[in-house]
Amino acid sequence: MRRMKLNSQVLRIFRSSAWSRAWRSLAAFLLGLLLAFIYGAIALYIQKHALWYCIITTVTMAAFTAFGMGLVVSVRTNVTLMLPMLCSREGKKILLFLIITLMIQGPLNNTLENFDRAAASVLCGAELAMNQTQQLMQRASTPLLPVLEKVREVSRNAYSLAGRVQNLISALTESVRHVSRSLRSVLYFLASIGDICNAKMGTPYKKCNSVFDEGRADCMELLSVFSFLCHIVDGFRPLCGLTRVGEFFCVIPSYIGNHLKTKLAFPIIAAFNQMKKEFEFNMSASVRFELNLNSSQSGHDMAQKIMEEVSQDRERVLDLMGLLTYVGFFLLLFLYLKAVLYKNRYLHSDDFDNFYITEQFVELDRKFSRQGKPAVLPLSKKEALTYITPYCLRLTARERRTVMTGLVSVLKHMVMGCVVIALDLMVFWVFDILHYHAQTEVVARAPLVVDIQVNGSGYASDIFKDIVASFDVLQKGNITILSKKCLMEPLKPEYMVYLFIGFLYGLVFLLVLAGGYAKRLQRFVCARYHPQREKVRILRLRSRILSQRGSLGKTLLRVVAREKENQGNGSVLQTLILRLPGGVTIARFMGFCDKSCLACGKAVKVENSSDVYTCSTQNCTGCFCMQCFRVMGNICAVCMGPLTFQEDSEYELDSSDEEQVNLWEVAMTSPHINQNADRMRLMRRNPVNTEDLSDSHTSNSELRASEDQCHNLYAPKLENIV
């Protein structure tokens, strides 16, 4: 007994509301942790964020979602509202954002990396071509180098020979200089003897001339007036020339000296100069190697700077695009804010997202119907286009527009993604073909090898042998045209990323197609957490449908009555055809006998009585489809319509409307009026209408003005009424 009591107490504890709330809180706590874990896994493994960023955001989200959902009901409601949003248009945006991040980190990054490698390969090839050009120029100048060496060797030998000749000439010059010094002493002696002789022998002549000059001067001084007589002295001056006979002996040494210079010194100097010229020679060898580069820096430095600029631009683009990957966390915050706004509008606006016919609505409508109140169900076809059940597969017009807009947006996004992926594949394909065909080195070799032999000895033979050997090395050398040193290896595309992107695109298509159905779950979540508010919204929806039906029914009644008044008894052609023999057949063939709904103008078949209502009142021509008949409140607009809407819009009668009054009286006893409320309403209105036969002076223009709007709405549909 004690065990049974204990078991019953345990069951009672487990079934208590507090225990169920604890279980719900625990489940919500675990669900919050699961959502945070999913976000962290996506951020770390798919978006490839930094580890510290993933840890901070995941811990923050886990603390908010887990503890918030476990302890606060409002947070639990908001987070639960986010789940249907993730499966609708907002989820599509988040998935498209995730696809963009994968595009940036996958195909776009691969494309930029391949272009980076291609740029590095091109720069390496340019530098290699420059180096090979220098090597080729060096090889082209190689045959001249041995010749220059031989010329240098000959010049060195000639220089040594010239040194020995220079020594010989120096010795000869020294001997000749000794002889010349002796001759110069003799010449100096002869020259001094001549000078002494001239000095000594020239004195008597000078003294004689000076005596004559003094005598003439004295004479001219004494004989001032007769000074002309003194010129007689000049006549005896030539006698002084007798004193120059001794000067002849002074000329002999000068003659001997000049003769020695001319006949001995000058020929000896000329002979020595000629000997020098015989041993003088000039040897010159010039090599010109020019490589003009219109640059202020080397090719290697230029390549490095170009690669640095390319890498900086690439890193700048990737950094700007990488910032977009951090928007995901803020998108989730924005989604949470939208969930809060949706719940707020649900709680404060009765008409917001309130067009669902739920099971609770059906039960409430049945309850009102059993109480004798007007029922809403079943809905008309027009109402069924607006008000649907949450589990209905048919979408409303607004949901279809949303789906089509989402599909167009996804298709545009998919075209952009396909272009990026195709660009990545195309770039890889081109570079892979280049890599495949450039695996082997292309080497240029001489087609013919010419062998030349030089026989002989001596300097000329050695020079020619070296020249031939140099050209032999040149023609046997190989030139590498295509080398593996600068061959780039393209980065392979990440095909798993492509498959994952395709999977995400398929998931986006699924979310777009099922977004309308998933969005209906938002109302279900709010109804689950706020049941009292849902009951108020259901009552509001029911009253709105009934008010729309009432106004629509009265409008149809007015339109049918107005069209009946305008049409009269039918057209003249129809009357003439019916009076002719066989006119019924002709009228049926021409379509005059076809029945149509007086309200909407839809063609109906009288034989199909389940979809057509024909008024059973005698002399009443009312024929309606069942949908319009239900909208009008199961009242014939021909015989009983004016009785129905007479209070709302005054209906004018005159003395010629006795037939209409009789039709009303017959309709009062019609078997299709089986409800006491309808019969009493018509009986109350009938006396009022009969009294108005004499004193009804209401303006017909006011009645028509109140019905113009409804007439314009239904007039296009009533043009085909028979």
Image: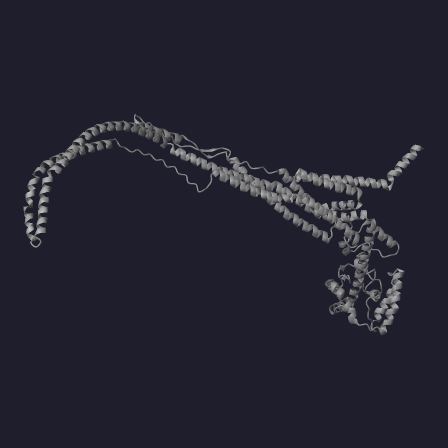
| Image side of residue 570 versus residue 325, left or right | right
| Image side of residue 479 versus residue 256, left or right | right
Q: 418 and 172: which one is in front?
A: 172
The image shows residue 697 at horizontal and vertical percentages of 82, 73
Query: Is residue 657 shown above or below 323?
Result: below
Q: Tell how many labels.
A: 0
Residue 479 visible in the current orientation? yes
Quadrant showing the N terminus = top right
The image shows residue 137 at horizontal and vertical percentages of 40, 35
Q: 628 and 555: which one is in front?
A: 555
| Image side of residue 695 versus residue 80, left or right | right
- The image's colour scheme reads one colour
| Image side of residue 635 versus residue 87, left or right | right
Q: 697 and 507: which one is in front?
A: 507
Query: Is residue 144 shown above or below 668?
Result: above
The image shows residue 604 at horizontal and vertical percentages of 77, 59
The image shows residue 701 at horizontal and vertical percentages of 77, 71
Q: Quadrant of residue 70?
A: top right
Taking the view exactly as shown, the residue that stands out farthest to the right is: 1
Q: Residue at x 11, y 39 (%)?
A: 203
